[in-house]
């Protein structure tokens, strides 16, 4: 099943726990997972696409997820990373489990993805963010900050000056040392650990394919470019709409993506096939069944 890993793109239909358990060791650079959030009930998108999201309590959810995390640790290269995407329901419990499996010392970032769409409440502040926990396999993890720079915003406490060469720079003086720092505006900056510049997908977004929990391509592009290099293997154990695979290929990475859902596999492969039609040079992924 894994003979082509790293050489061809792979879409596998089956139980992600079993696929991960049998995947080769130290063969993958980046694993991103966006598992069910334990909301309870059915998540429904357009065109009838849906999946059951069990209403696990946090302890049961964490126990369910742990074997997949352990398998992920085994398949990652020494330079590799795992990024787990969840929300307030289980994230704190999962953080403790990840510390146990990966080691507290290998925790890199808690990334807060902020957005404003969705329902409001009259009894509490609106729950308007997801949390992404980033762990490295070791201290040798890849981080390409310069690949994901964002524009610098005006109106900050820093003055804006123009150099003799005509370049705009933001200027900051350290009050203690007196040292002056100059940041070229055109170069942008590496994002902080809160991301408010990537909106969720609205109902009419062009990239929507109908999957109920589809994530924006821009979100996955930042993650993939930051934590992997061209030619690396990127894995998503919960394929869903196929966004991870779609963006990984666009960024010059190889991918392995897995899901047990017929609808998810059909959606992802159709999305990847549509891109192939736009670029005849793209080699279609190998689609396999793990059953």
Image: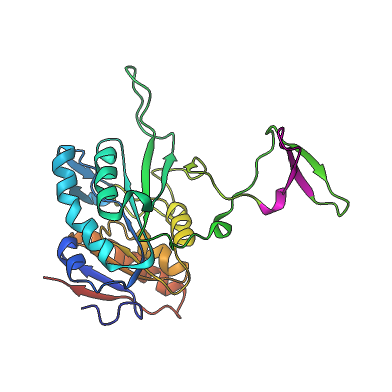
Q: Residue at x 80, y 51 (%)?
A: 167
224 over 50 or under it: above or below = below
Q: Given the current orientation, which residue lies at the most extreme left position?
A: 291
**Residue 201 appears in the rendering:** no
Q: Is residue 7 left or right of residue 169?
A: left
Q: Given the current orientation, which residue lies at the most extreme right position?
A: 164
Closer to the camera, 18 or 12?
A: 18
How many marks the image carries: the answer is 0
Give the quadrant of residue 228.
Answer: bottom left
- Say whether residue 197 is magenta: no
Q: Which residues are magenta?
A: 168-187
Q: Residue at x 22, y 69 (%)?
A: 12
Q: Residue at x 50, y 40 (%)?
A: 196
Q: Given the current orientation, which residue lies at the most extreme front position?
A: 177
Q: Is residue 199 left or right of residue 102?
A: right
Give the quadrant of residue 28.
Answer: bottom left
Closer to the camera, 106 or 259?
A: 106
Location of residue 67 in the rendering, given as x and y in whole percent from the top left corner: 17, 57
Location of residue 45 in the rendering, given as x and y in whole percent from the top left corner: 27, 46
Q: Is residue 263 left or right of residue 231?
A: left
277 over 3 or under it: above or below = above
Location of residue 204 in the rendering, given as x and y in whole percent from the top left corner: 41, 46
Location of residue 100 in the rendering, given as x and y in whole percent from the top left corner: 25, 50
Q: Residue at x 31, y 71 (%)?
A: 26
Q: Quadrant of the C terminus?
A: bottom left
Q: Quadrant of the N terminus?
A: bottom left
**Residue 152 appears in the rendering:** yes
Closer to the camera, 201 or 75?
A: 75
- Say whether residue 181 is magenta: yes
């Amino acid at each position: 099943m894994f003979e082509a890993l790293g050489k061809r793109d792979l879409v596998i239909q089956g139980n992600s726990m079993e696929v991960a358990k049998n995947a080769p060791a130290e063969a993958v650079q980046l694993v991103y997972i966006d598992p069910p959030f334990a909301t309870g009930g059915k998540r429904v998108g357009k065109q009838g696409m849906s999946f059951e999201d069990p209403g696990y309590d946090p302890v049961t959810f964490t126990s369910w997820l742990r074997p997949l995390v352990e398998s992920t640790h085994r398949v990652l290269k020494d330079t590799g990373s795992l990024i787990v995407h969840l929300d307030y329901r289980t994230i704190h419990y999962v953080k403790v489990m990840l510390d146990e499996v990966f080691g507290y010392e290998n925790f890199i970032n808690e990334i807060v993805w902020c957005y404003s769409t969705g329902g409001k409440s009259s009894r509490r502040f609106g729950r308007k963010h997801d949390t992404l926990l980033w762990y490295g396999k070791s201290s040798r993890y890849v981080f390409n900050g310069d690949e994901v720079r964002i524009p610098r915003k005006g109106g900050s406490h820093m003055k804006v000056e123009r150099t003799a060469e005509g370049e705009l720079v933001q200027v900051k003086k350290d009050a203690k040392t007196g040292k002056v720092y100059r940041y070229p505006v055109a170069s942008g900056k590496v994002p902080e650990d809160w991301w408010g510049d990537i909106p969720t997908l609205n109902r009419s977004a062009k990239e929507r394919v109908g999957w109920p929990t589809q994530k924006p391509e821009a979100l996955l592009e930042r993650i993939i470019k930051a934590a992997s290099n061209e030619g690396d293997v990127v894995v998503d154990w919960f394929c869903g709409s196929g966004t991870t695979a779609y963006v990984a290929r666009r960024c010059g990475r190889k991918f392995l993506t897995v899901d047990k859902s017929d609808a998810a596999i059909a959606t992802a492969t159709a999305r990847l096939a549509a891109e192939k039609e736009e670029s005849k040079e793209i080699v279609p992924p190998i689609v396999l069944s793990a059953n």
